[in-house]
Image: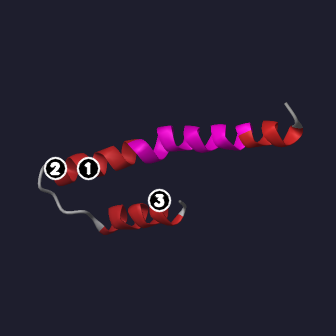
Amino acid sequence: MNTVESNNIGVLTVLVTQFRRSRLPRLLEIKESVIHGNKISEEDIEFLNNVISSL
C-alpha cells in the first residue's frame, strides 16, 4: 500500500467515525421527533443544511 492509499484510508476512517459518532445519532433524533409529530427547529434545520452542504 502506498502513501496516497494510506492517506485515503485515514481520511475515510475519520469521516465514517465522525458520521457514526455525531451526525447519525442527531439525524436519528430528528427523524424520531418528526415521526412523533414535532416540528423541526431552526437549530435542526441549520444542522441538516450543514450535513447536506458537506456532501
Residue in the picture at 73% in, 38% down: 10
- What is the secondary structure assignment of the residue under circle 1? helix
Residue 12: within the magenta?
A: yes
- Foreground residue among 36 and 8: 8
Residue 51's label in the rendered image is: 3
Q: CA distance from mark 1 to mark 2?
A: 6 Å
> How packed is label 2: few (under 14 Cα within 10 Å), some, or many (20 or more)?
few
According to the picture, the residue beneath numbered tag 2 turns out to be 35
> How packed is label 1: few (under 14 Cα within 10 Å), some, or many (20 or more)?
few
Q: CA distance from mark 2 to mark 3?
A: 20 Å
Ranked by sequence position, the earlier of labels 3 and 1 is 1
Give the left or right position of residue 5, taking residue 20 as reference: right
Residue 38: within the magenta?
A: no
The percent position of residue 7, horizontal first and vertical second, equals 79, 41
Residue in the picture at 38% in, 42% down: 25
Residue type at mark 3: give it. Answer: Val
Labels 3 and 1 touching (C-beta < 8 A): no
